[in-house]
Amino acid sequence: MRGVDPGSISDCAVCAKHIRFSAKLRPRQVIANVYEDGKWQRVEYFHEECYQIANAPYGNTQS
């Protein structure tokens, strides 16, 4: 899990909304490298709260 950078152009894999930077709120995002059969396939981005709502599909996060 990490902070959202200014100018981020990622969309959440759960709610499909843009993951936006906010200086006041300091939002965090989950970035998951997805592997299938041991081979990297893609990167998925999540709002911190959406990842929890989805029951952490790729396991617990690291701060």
Image: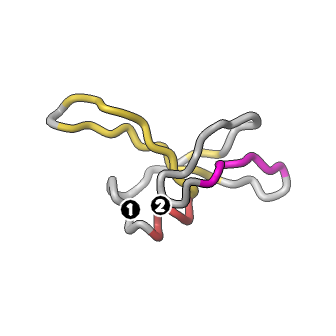
**In magenta stretch: residue 42:** no
Q: Disc 1 on helix, strand or loop?
A: loop
- The structure residue drawn at horizontal position 37% and vertical position 34%, both measured from the top left corner, is 42
What type is the residue that disc 1 sits on?
Ala
Q: Position of residue 6 (x, y in %)?
A: 76, 37
Looking at the image, do the residues carrying marks 1 and 2 touch, with CB atoms under 8 Å apart? yes
Q: Quadrant of residue 55?
A: bottom left
Residue 5 disc label: none
Residue pushed farthest top? 39
29, above or below 38, in the image: below
Q: Which residue is mark 1?
A: 56
Q: Nearer the viewer, residue 42 or 24?
A: 42
Q: Which residue is mark 2?
A: 51
- The structure residue drawn at horizontal position 78% and vertical position 58%, both measured from the top left corner, is 25
Q: Position of residue 51 (x, y in %)?
A: 47, 61
Left or right of 20 on screen, residue 16: left
